[in-house]
Image (cartoon, coloured by chain):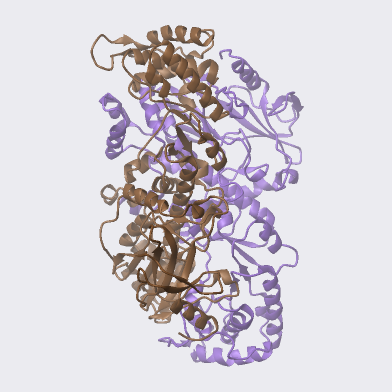
Chain colours: A purple, B brown
Amino acid sequence: MAAELDPEASAAARPLLTDLYQATMALGYWRAGRARDQAEFELYFRRCPFGGAFALAAGLRDCVRFLRTFRLRDADVQFLASVLPSDTDPAFFEHLRTLDCSGVTVRALPEGSLAFPSVPLLQVSGPLLVVQLLETPLLCLVSYASLIATNAARLRLIAGPTKRLLEMGLRRAQGPDGGLTASTYSYLGGFDGSSNVLAGQLRGVPLAGTLAHSFVTSFSGAEVPPDPMLAPAASQGPRVDLAACVEAWLERVCAHLGLGVQEPHRGERAAFVAYALAFPRAFQGLLDTYSVQRSGLPNFLAVALALGELGYRAVGIRLDSGDLLQQAQEIRRVFRTVAAQFQMPWLESVPIAVSNNIDEEELARLAQEGSEVNVIGIGTTVVTCPRQPSLGCVYKLVSVGGQPRMKLTEDPEKQTLPGSKAAFRLLGSDGSLLMDVLQLAEEPPPQPGQELRVWPRGAREACVVRPAHVEPLLRLCIQQGQLCGPLPSLAESRAFAQLSLGRLNPEHKRLEQPAPYQVALSDELQALVDRLSTGGSS
Amino acid sequence: MAAELDPEASAAARPLLTDLYQATMALGYWRAGRARDQAEFELYFRRCPFGGAFALAAGLRDCVRFLRTFRLRDADVQFLASVLPSDTDPAFFEHLRTLDCSGVTVRALPEGSLAFPSVPLLQVSGPLLVVQLLETPLLCLVSYASLIATNAARLRLIAGPTKRLLEMGLRRAQGPDGGLTASTYSYLGGFDGSSNVLAGQLRGVPLAGTLAHSFVTSFSGAEVPPDPMLAPAASQGPRVDLAACVEAWLERVCAHLGLGVQEPHRGERAAFVAYALAFPRAFQGLLDTYSVQRSGLPNFLAVALALGELGYRAVGIRLDSGDLLQQAQEIRRVFRTVAAQFQMPWLESVPIAVSNNIDEEELARLAQEGSEVNVIGIGTTVVTCPRQPSLGCVYKLVSVGGQPRMKLTEDPEKQTLPGSKAAFRLLGSDGSLLMDVLQLAEEPPPQPGQELRVWPRGAREACVVRPAHVEPLLRLCIQQGQLCGPLPSLAESRAFAQLSLGRLNPEHKRLEQPAPYQVALSDELQALVDRLSTGGSS
């Protein structure tokens, strides 16, 4: 029943989807009497992905779903008991049975926000034992979602605003909800839709699909459809035998193209007729099963023209091999001459869709000026993020019992920023982004129009900035286990992502060697870092 | 209830986890009266991953689970009705409601088998509409599982047989069951275990875990454990105050190492004491939160020696930054001198575990002769397979209504091999693998000791081979929806994978520029390919 009521229940992460050391540390905290100490963790990344200078925050809706249902079941506790020392105090397991997120508070960057290194995507506070246990699932839910949203945003920047970008990578994902996550967050990042039906059902992602080569090869041409008759689009006039019309049109098309009427594959044509009978208002052709020019294209045209005579308009073709750009140009040229020859002007602009291992370079080529490609389906390159398949988010303790905590380590990049913090985005008078500032939670927020001394990350000197506008970055999302308000819809987050990107200076949006966007610390936060770094106490 | 009964229910793929074109094609087949035509598809890959010459087949157990529960729910059918044309015949949706896999038969390479290009991992036959719908989920379940098993096998080849390899990549996976799949199949491919608790609970993968930096930084040293007393391991003798013993040992350790007793971080030491109180028989230290040499190591030694005095033996340390190999050598040297100094010989051989973005190159360095590293935790490199994050499996129609089908296309690599086939592995007299042969299902199997003329893929000439042994590769797994026998356990498949790899000639196991392993077609299959390629019918 629960699964029927919550269609996403099966996609939600489970409490035991975590690293074993979270459970061992839980026992350690409990044994030390510290299970209920108030602690705060921050989830952030250290470097922007793909050599770029920005990322998009995503995955919050999955985190919220996880946190609201977080609870160890009996079977979970029994399993933990089986892997922890056999002489563990049974009271520890009783404690585990009581756990939920009712004491947990989460502040977050809204989904679709620009995110930069060291700026928390999530701030999670609550009882030490619980917020520690949340580490792995939250990282698992945020890292890939943000990576794929960022990847999709980059692909959108390459493609420009008008090409229709479709995610088709379910079969290339890391199993079922890798695929669901990819479809959801590539849409958030700027794609137009996905082939993934479950993403449409559960997340409302717009769906798109054509047909596969197997559909085409399954027909030999000897098949007899049970009902070959089709009524005109306007429902007036007699039904006609579509297959017979198509044969008549094929002769005219072949004569026009200078092809022998025997050249186009009859099985392919039978497949197109079958598809047209099922989808007269949404007929599409996949042209490269046998030969695009000598078979796929004339067969498509014959069916499209036969449908056109009945008042239907074909909605697209797809190419899945060869030089996609060049073929699209040739096909568009043929569409134009055929449209003129047979006085079906709508045929000129039938969308041309392409797919086949399209990467960033090929996408740029397909999106160049004058390209006749309209729809681009991308699978592997969007889903697996081959340039950098992991964002590398971390989840670090910043305070416990109200005291700031810092990991010093001998690797400077792995040092953490201590203390409970607030984060602000400083903007210029034209609304463009200047820098993000991290400060201690108790400091007053930066004031618009006033000078502020800050310490840019990685620089040795402070600098002074005077923002025209100041925006707080982190929103209270869950307070003591209670959701603070409705989350935006996926489409709203998608629009917010494009809005956010629109305010970012082009030098930070360059995909190769962009100018880094500055993140800076307040005077007080920098002083705390310095004090703790030299071994001083807080 | 169902979720309680089948602990994996929520991890199983759902029928709508598929590409939209599967649903549109389903309608096309149905409208053409072909929904129940008998069809066969093959799932295979075209090139071995990672530039290698082999892959391991995996994912079958997930496919079986999916197929046995495959059924469209009412909500699923209603959703499909909402995305298909509104004038679609309602009888189509009635047909969808009746679908299951009771007419589906599956032959498969057993999990852990060596797999090579063009050799089917799965052969799926049944009603055309159903077996078409299965395409995307089966690809999703097999591709990543096989990719990660192969990746794990490569990493095991690099590490050699004695290093303990642990998968720790859950936080770097594509969401929850990306992580579960990675943990399951990296174990199958040769890892020793995983940090992923759910993989332990659901799949029986051995678990391992240490502690995180947050545990260490959460302690300032001012905390007072509710019960600092620990009984000796043998349970004889009085309980002692562990923290006090540790302070006494710290003085001796610091004197021995030439460190000031104030140098080791007291918060870190408190964390180690807390962990030791919770895990006296399984004490481990994470040494690099502050400074390995000046803090982590002396603190660990003080706790390990205090425990040692009580009869407990520490089980390991972990390093997560810096030069892992060099630090391991230094730490082992210190372990030896301290073991001798304080007459605790077991301390010499406390396992040293390392982690921190370990890739193939770093793994080779850590596994070199004389390395003191014992346990290697790998996350991103195993889970995301950065060298090639997708295997690129395909699922192609090979016959329908008993007639072979072939996709010709102008891209030779994308041509398919027609017909229902059998596959055999030919072996030499020493049991080593010679080649795989694909032939038509109706041909008699190759006979041991007899000459066989075959056509190696990619060659223009036939060659003659005389195998000493012949093994059929594909096993009947599901017949008309019924499982044909119990599947091997994960541990059995893991052992089978290592056995399979052991029979492969080293020249094919080289990770860089290996000799390709030959896959060949029988005379009859080659003749069929030639006939269909030139437009002849079957």
User: Residue A181: where, in percent of width, then height?
Assistant: 49, 51
Image location (x, y in percent) of residue A117? 63, 35
Residue at 71 percent across and 85 percent down: it is A340
Q: How many marks?
A: 0
Q: Check the image and report above or below for A329 versus B212.
A: below
Q: Is residue A3 left or right of residue B176?
A: left
- Using the image as rendered, state which of residue B39 and residue A124 is in the foreground: B39
* Nearest to the observer: residue A418 or residue B304: B304
**Vertical relation: A351 (above or below) A193:** below
The C terminus of chain B lies in which quarter of the figure? bottom left
Front residue of B440 and A395 = B440
Residue B84 visible in rendering: no
Question: Is residue B339 something one can see in this rendering?
Answer: yes
Q: Within the image, what quadrant is residue A383 found in?
A: bottom right
Image position, residue A533 (x, y; %)? 61, 18
Q: Residue furthest left?
A: B236
Does residue A71 lie above or below A209 as drawn?
A: above
The image quadrant that residue B484 belongs to is: bottom left
Residue A254 position within the rendered picture, expressed as x and y whole percent measured from the top left: 64, 89
